[in-house]
Every structure is written in C-alpha cells, then in structure tokens.
Amino acid sequence: MKTIRLTAAQALVRYLENQFNDDGDRIIEGVWAIFGHGNVAGLGEALYHVKDNLPTYRGHNEQTMAHAAIAYAKQSGRKRTMAVTSSIGPGGTNMVTAAALAHVNRLPVLLIPGDVFASRGPDPVLQQIEDFNDGTVTANDCFKPVSRYFDRITRPEQLITALPRAFRAMTDPADCGPATLAFCQDVQAQAWDYPASMFEPKTWSSRRPEPDQGELARAVALINAAKNPVIVAGGGVHFSAACDALRDFAQKHNVPVVETQAGKSVLKWNHPMAFGPVGVTGSDSANAVCGDADLVIGVGTRFQDFTTGSWSLFKNPERKLLALNIQPWDAMKHDAVSLVADARVGLEKLSSGLGDYRAEDSAPNLQADWYAEVDAVTAAPNDASHLPTDMQVIGAVQRAANEDTVVMSAAGTMPGELHKLWKSYNPGAYHMEYGFSCMGYEIAGAMGIKMAQPGREVICFTGDGTYMMANSELATAVMMGIDFTLIVTDNRGYGCINRLQMGTGGAEFNNMLDHSHHVNASAIDFVKHTESMGAKSRKVASVAELEQALSERTGKGVEVIVVDTDPYPSTEAGGSWWEVAVPEVSERKEVREAHDKYVVARNERNTQ
C-alpha cells in the first residue's frame, strides 16, 4: 500500500481539498480561522501551504465566523460549506452557539476547535477546563449535544475513520448538520504514514430516498379523502430543490401552499397557489386556509411552534396531519401520518398516485385582501414628522429591490415583519435564520450569503440591539471586499421583546435603553461606528430619505443606512396565538388579566 507521511493537520487539510459534491464543486470551499495556541502551529502551518487552493479567511470572532460559514451553506442549498477552526478554550466555546444554530437549522459546517494535549504532558494547559471527576472531559465536550457528529482526535491515524464520518453527517440529507472534530494540539503536529488512497478525489452524492410503498399508499388515500388540504412548505423544499415540483403539485391538484420562515420563497409571492406566510408571523390568507383545512400536508418542515401557532392554528375538528420529510424524526411528530422520502421525489410520487384529484377552491380574494393590507402598512407615510415604522422601512427596501435581491435577517422585530410583508420573487430570495433566532447572525450571515452567491444583491436588516451584540465581521467584509447593504433600524433597545413583555402584562423593564439601569443616557452613533470599520454609512431621517439613499447605492463595499424607528407599532393584521407562559400570581393587574387570557387560549388549543 502506498503511503504519504504527513502531520495530522496536513492530512486533514489535504482530505478537505479532495471532497466534492455531485455538481463537481468542492464541499469545503474555505476555512475560517482565528489562530491561538491550540491550532496555530498545527493547522496554521498546514493551511498556509494550500492557501492558494483552499483559502483561509480571518474573522474577528469565532461565533460569527461560523455564522458566515453556516449562511454560506444555507444559501448554497447545503451542497457547499466551510470549515471553522479555533484555539482551545474560549475560542472553541465561542463556536458552541453557532453549532447549535447549525444543528437546529439542519445545516452543514465543519468545526475544528483545538483541544488539550493528548499526551497530558503539560497538563493543565493554558485555558484548559478541568473536570474533577473525569480526566477525558474538556471544554469541547460542550459541542456534543449541538453536533450531528462529534469526535476527539487523540491520535493522527484516527482521521482515517473520523473524516468520512464527519462528511457523512454533513452530506446526508436526513442527518445533515454540524460536525465537530476536537483536534488535540500535540496530535495536529504528529506525523503518520497515511494511505495515499485517503486523498484521492471523492464525490459525495446527495441521496433522494423514495417513499415506502405502504406509506405512499396511505398518503395518497388520505389526500384523496380530503376536501380542503393545505401544504405547509418548509426549508426542506429548498434543500431538496423541490420548488418546481411543489409548484406543479399545487397547480395540478389545486392545493394552497403556505410558507414557514425557512420555506418562504418556495413560490413567487403572487403565484395563484401561494397563500403567504403561516403561523404566528403569518398572513390572514395562510392562517385562514390552515384553520379550515381537513388535511395539513407538511413538506420539509419540522412544525416549529411559530409555524403552528403553538398547535392552535389548525382548528378543523376533522383535521389530519401528513408529514413528508426525509427525516423520520420530523415525519412522526404529533401523530402525523408519515411519508419518509426526499421532498421532490415524494411530491412527484404523490402527484402520480393522485391522478386527476383536485381539492375544492379556497375562499376567493384571500390573497388579494392580504396584500392590500401589506401595501397599506408598507406604504410611504404622508406625514414625515413621526418616526417611521419597521413596516414602512421594509416597504422602502422592497420598492428598491429587484429579482436578484436576497433579503436576510435573524432575530428581533424584522423576522416577524419580513415574514409577513416581504414579497419574494424566486427561491433563495429570502434568507432568515429563525430556527435558532440567534442575534448576531445578521452581519456575518450577509457576508456568507454574498460569498455563496456573489452575483446576487444582498440586503441585511439588523436592529440596534443585534448590531451591538455582534458587528465585528463588518470589518471583515470590508477587508475582504464583500459587497452588501446593511439597514440598521435603531429603536433604542430590544423593541420586539419589549412588546412581548407588555403583551404579557409586564411593565416596560430592562429592554429599552431608557427603561434599563443607567447613569448616562445611551447615545450610540451607528454611522461613526460603521464608518470606523470601513463602511460607507449615512443616517436618514425619513422614509423619503431612505428611498433616496437606497437609490444612490453603488453596490460596491458595505453600504450602511441607519434609520431611527418607532419601537411600538407592529403589523396588526395576520398572526396567530403563540404560547408564552404568563405568571399565575402577580401584583400587577395587567399580568393577572394576561394570565386569564392565556388560560382561555391554552384551553381552547387543548380542546381542538
């Protein structure tokens, strides 16, 4: 057997260079790295020698570097991703939140935190977490519950089995998620005679499992018996490249389609079968057809509580649930009739089995009435003396967008308003991280989206609170010449959660800056701050000025527009109940009243 003598770090890097998807693209397109004593000598040296073929990118925070890699993977349809490496200790634990984000959203990323000495010679090494009862535990054990595959590399030859297992986790459409290889720092530098065959180019094909015939027959019978079915389209439709199949199925069988946060943009916003966003942040049109549906067909969705209105949305007492999903875990939730299969294949097989079946028509004018509401709340205000609402800001950006625009966000007010109000033109035009709803994803995510699809315009919405939580990758984007637009809506605090606090009877407390403990009033200058990192920035005082600023963008560099917004209004139309537990006992009358309403709504849900 022919062998090649390499350090473990060199072997890992060479392996990454030679893993491809079935489109012929390399799966790991680059490596994000912040070097420290746990990875600089080993992986740092290995990456240096391949920098012209496998680029290494330097970020400013391990978590946000991983966010960029994850956004890249999502916008690539899970067919490409990146690796992220850190030093041991805080560099590694900084990535745990990002690992959880990738896990929840079923997105591939390869995380390579440095680890302690396998030899334990200098034990305890700098930054080492010591478990008093288990000598095998390190800080990197935090990754275990948030990784699809976890391994600790304590000998160089372990890579021979560990690397294929990691790639299986990242490329398997059912189990897709983050893989973590905790890489002991002394092992990175150790040499081994690796089999040359390990580094031959390998193609990882994406499976398209067909449904079990028995499950398919039951699913067809269930749909045939339904008069008013509805399809809840989730992110799995995008990852299966099943948008066309879904459109054809809906048209042929007259089944309305509603979209989750992850599923939004599977159909063009004005398609006749597109009834809009569903759930807590959903439209009247979507939630109406869901309320009447006698069969709810989930396609590639995990039925998150925001999608189902905490399972209060589907009100028809005859309602049944059918779940088409490649992951059996998701296909059996809430006693659903399961159809375990690839989304595209499953839809095609269902359509063939249904023949000429067509559902009854939904109530007329649902979509037209909803978009009349959308147009009303997103229109430019006649009175410029008041602070703009978030809805009016969205309207201005919508009018400036085109069919190549990708709009993105992650947490706070904007996910709810964008889900309700944004009109998506094509698949991939809406990128929302709402599985984990992680503040701090936005700027790094925008960078990752643009790296994945450089030909598309990327517009990122972030609030002032999220901006302050994680903004450093803006400097990275400027340094790397990555172009996108950043809209900073400044409502002077955590406006979304403040509204929730008030909605559950609570007093305004510790969310808005003025209602938080302070000696000096906060006066953050976001224009100066973004300019200090190299962005081209301006502040606007009205929607008219925002529209002017949007029209004057050059499309080069990071262009930031800051606008003060009113923290209190939200879109009243649409939406549904969401279960947030309210205290049973309180001195506040408002809380007691909110609890009474909560009990009524919960009991109504439980009797459906």
Image (cartoon, rainbow, N blue to C red):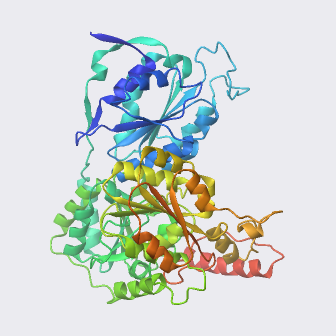
**Can you see residue 466?**
no
- Residue visible at 33% across and 74% down in the picture: 269
Residue at screen point 67% across, 71% down = 498
Looking at the picture, tell me which residue is in the foreground, 51 or 478: 478
- Residue 330 versus residue 164 in the image, above or below: below
Q: Is residue 486 above or below residue 308?
A: above
Viewer-proximal residue, 309 or 247?
Answer: 247
Say left or right for 194 vs 545.
left
In which image quadrant can residue 564 be found?
bottom right
Q: Nearer the viewer, residue 98 or 223?
A: 98
Residue 192 location (% of width, % of height): 41, 11
Image vertical order of residue 307 relative to residue 435, above or below:
below
Q: Quadrant of residue 375?
A: bottom left
* Relative height, residue 292 to residue 160 (above, below): below
Q: Position of residue 241 (x, y in %)?
A: 27, 56
Residue 515 % position (x, y): 77, 69
- Give the quadrant of the N terminus: top left
Where residue 506 sits: x, y (%)? 74, 74
Relative side of 81 to 101, left or right: left
Q: Nearer the viewer, residue 57 or 524?
A: 524
Instruction: Count all numbered tags in the image, as a single digit.
Output: 0
Residue 2 seen by the camera: yes
